[in-house]
Image: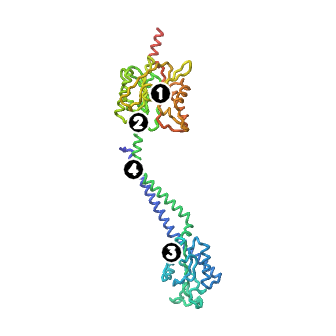
Amino acid sequence: MISERVKPKLLWFRLSIGFGGLLALLLLAQTLATYNFVSRSLIRQEAVRDADRRVQTITRMARQAAVTEPAKLTAILNELVKDDADQIAWIRIINFEGRVLAAGGDTSPAGAYKPGEIGKLMGDRERIPAEVNTNSGRAFVILNPVRFGALGFGRGPGEPPLPPAPPQLSAPNGEQAGGGGRSRGRRPPEVAEFGILRRGISTKFGPLQTNLIVGCAASIALLGAMLIIALRFRGYMQSKHIEEELSVARRVQHDLFPNDDSISSRLGFAARCIPAYQVGGDLYDVFETDDGEVALILGDVSGKGLPAALLMGVVQGAVRASIGTGAASNHEQAAERLNHLMCMKTARERFVSLFWCYYDRDNGVLRYVNAGHLPPLLMRRSAAGPEILKLDEGGPVFGLLPGVRYKQASIDCKPGDILVVFSDGIQEAANAKDEEFGEDGIAASLERNWHRPPAELCSAILADVRTFMGGCLPSDDQTLLVVKLDPVTTIQETAEHAAALIR
């Protein structure tokens, strides 16, 4: 359920997604419109201007060569097409009746205009060039007037060229100055038909078209991102809700762990649990029994994350429930009951390895059951040097084999003995070379720092593990429990001892 405090934030988030999607659509529409304008208008206009320039070139070259026959003009047209083959498909000189007077280049395409329409089209200043397919690609067909009347083009065989009309009798448009008829001294001009290749003109707008394509891609990407965010919004909010619940679960799990000073009157210890994810499947606990003994447990639930953390809470609760009178003497039966519970209530792929012990401070005896856990290390100092014992007796892991019997073992402890219990995340911590820290690494770190208090010793071992791993991240939960098995003298005991000395 989303709280009322969060709802305004979600509303602004949805509005932002909607505004982003609308902006992406507007940007895409504007970019497509601009690209269409460039492709359909600017390129055609540039083709018309290019044809106008080439008309002037043809006229100038014809006058310089004093061309009197269309065949000679054909050579000029072929030369022009050859020089600009990437832009010109063909050039034809035709009259108003559509008869071809001269041609150069690819002469296979038929004209895009009917002969009867040429005069009408020539009078249209806003005419749009037609576009046809050629052997060289798409081409614009552009008509431009060009006057070759003085050279004799367009006349029949044996007909002399028409003399030019007197200036005072003709207007610039070829009509008589004083009437509506066409001047008898002038005839309609010839028409230059150009086939301008689209790809040749498009190269001039290449950078602009590239920018427009990039703009289209960016707007489509923005629109796609907004759609993905909108579609994934509900899942995102659910994942955020789960993340908040995991954060609460981590705090609850942390609160289940004992404080270092919670039983300082009975035993000195320090412990750390570093989960690989938000919550972990490792557990440890230190508490007193009704008989005044200190119970210590450290276990590792199979798997990681929230399922392992839930099972860890069940195991911790079951162990805590057995702290009544005679807990140490009923240790084996309690372990068998816990195994039966795990086998009945959990799947076979879910099991727990657990080191479970009771420390009798008064008699200096440690009784334990190791249920498939990594053997803890008990280090004691002697004249011959440090001695390390492994505590590995007990039975298999809990929750895997029903009806298994567990055996309690005991060991006499001496003042100064140090017990180190750890999960496989400590022993199997790997570096970049895929080398494991191992039991030898734990023992070496323990020997270097054995003289320190439990809290400092615990921190020193974890620091050595981090140094060994380098920049590698842990792949499993790392839990470490360090216990100094020295009886801790309470204030009451100190007072009683002082009173006895005075007496």
Residue most extreme to the left: 344
User: Dot 2, crowdedness within 10 Å: few (<14), some or many (≥20)?
Assistant: many
Q: Secondary structure at mark 4?
A: helix
The residue beneath circle 3 is: 129
Quadrant, the N terminus: top left
* Sequence-first tag of 4 and 2: 4
* Residue 460 shows up from this direction: no
User: Dot 1, crowdedness within 10 Å: few (<14), some or many (≥20)?
Assistant: some
* Sequence-first tag of 3 and 4: 4
Which mark, residue 375?
Answer: 1
Q: Secondary structure at mark 1?
A: loop
- The amino acid sitting under disc 2 is Ala
- The amino acid sitting under disc 4 is Leu
* Sequence-first tag of 3 and 1: 3
User: Dot 3, crowdedness within 10 Å: few (<14), some or many (≥20)?
Assistant: some
The residue beneath circle 4 is: 11
Q: Secondary structure at mark 3?
A: loop
Is residue 14 or residue 350 the one in the foreground?
350
Determine whether 18 is above or below 47 in the image: above
Badge nearest the viewer, 4 or 2: 2
- Is mark 4 in CB contact (under 8 Å) with mark 2? no
- The amino acid sitting under disc 3 is Pro
State the colouring used for the structure image.
rainbow
- Is mark 1 in CB contact (under 8 Å) with mark 2? no
Badge nearest the viewer, 1 or 2: 1
Residue ID at (46%, 16%): 494
207 with respect to 342 (left or right): right
Is residue 73 or residue 245 the one in the foreground?
73
- The amino acid sitting under disc 1 is Pro
The residue beneath circle 2 is: 308
